[in-house]
Every structure is written in structure tokens, then in C-alpha cells.
Image (tube, helix red, strand yellow):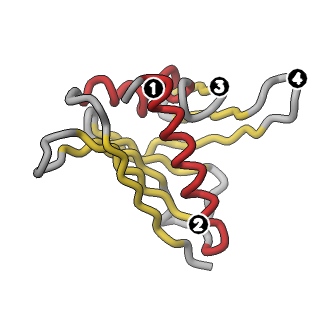
Amino acid sequence: MTKQRIDIEYPLTTMSPNIIWDQISSAHGLERWFADHVEENEGMFTFTWGEPWTEQDIRTAQTIDCVKYDHIRLKWDTDDDEEGFWEMRIEKSDLTHHLNLLITDFADDDDVDGLKILWESNLDRLHRASGL
């Protein structure tokens, strides 16, 4: 089954790529909005959702490409699709000169709406946690 590409553009309230870069590329930054607990070791991120006293979902993703202040591309360890990845990219709008966070992800046809809702919820958490 082929996966459908999902692209989400999220406008940011900062003009500094340094601020957003820490939020999308470091364990500390990702822990503020993406998962309850994040660890990073040599390009391998371990994401944990849920508290230790409850049922937890633990997933790992390997960094497959990273350009500082531009983008980070990761691949879930459970993703069998050779072309599969998810990416967070910082891009400056030519029209407004403001920064946008571009999310690229892939989902099976029946999971597209749920994944979009999940990303929108996470981006809302990013805004509440950092003001971006």
C-alpha cells in the first residue's frame, strides 16, 4: 500500500531561525511540544508518550538528513517504506518575509485525516509552549 504525502505549513511569529531550530531539532525542544519525553543519542531520537505509571507509547526515529537552521528529516524505525520519512523545515516566505514551519509526513489513505489532526494539535502545543 502506498502512502499519501501530507504537507502542512505553519506560520511562525519569530523572525529568528535559531529559536525554532532548537524546538525542532533537540530532545529538550521536542519534549516541550512533540512528546512527553524525548532522548537523543547520536542521531537516534526516542519519543515517549504517556507517563511511567500509565501505558506508554515508545517509538524511535533515526535522523536521515539535517541542515542546521533549515530542516531535519527523520525516519521511524517501524517504517518499512524505503522512501518514508517525516520532516520539519524552516522556510522564509518570499511575500511576507516571515518564517514558516513546513511539515512533511506520510500516511496510509485511511490515516491521513488523523495524522493531520495530530500534527495540528502538536503545532498548537508548540505555539502554547514557546509562543512561536
Horizontal arrangement in the rendering, residue 128 relative to residue 57 (left or right): left
Residue to which mark 1 is pinned: 26
Identity, as a three-letter code, of the amino acid under mark 1: Ser
Secondary structure at badge 4 equals loop
What residue is shown at x 52% (from left), y 63% (from top)?
A: 106
Q: Is residue 61 shown above or below 23?
A: below
State the image coordinates of residue 63 (x, y, percent, origin top left).
46, 42
Q: Mark 2 to mark 1: distance in Å?
A: 26 Å
Q: Are marks 4 and 1 in contact (CB under 8 Å)?
A: no
Q: How many marks?
A: 4
Name which of mark 2 and mark 1 comes first in the sequence: 1
Horizontal arrangement in the rendering, residue 76 relative to residue 83 (left or right): right
Q: Is residue 87 shown above or below 124?
A: below
Q: Are marks 3 and 2 in contact (CB under 8 Å)?
A: no
Secondary structure at badge 3 equals strand
Q: Are marks 3 and 1 in contact (CB under 8 Å)?
A: no
Name which of mark 4 and mark 1 comes first in the sequence: 1
Comparing labels 2 and 4, the label whose residue is closer to the camera = 2
Residue to which mark 4 is pinned: 53
Residue to which mark 2 is pinned: 112
Identity, as a three-letter code, of the amino acid under mark 2: Val
Q: Which image quarter is the N terminus in?
A: bottom right
* 68, 117: nearer the viewer: 117
Q: Are marks 4 and 3 in contact (CB under 8 Å)?
A: no
Label 4 crowd bin: few (<14), some (14–19), many (20+), radius 10 Å: few
Secondary structure at badge 1 equals loop
Residue to which mark 3 is pinned: 37
Identity, as a three-letter code, of the amino acid under mark 4: Trp
Secondary structure at badge 2 equals helix
Name which of mark 4 and mark 3 comes first in the sequence: 3
Q: Mark 3 to mark 2: distance in Å?
A: 25 Å
Identity, as a three-letter code, of the amino acid under mark 3: His
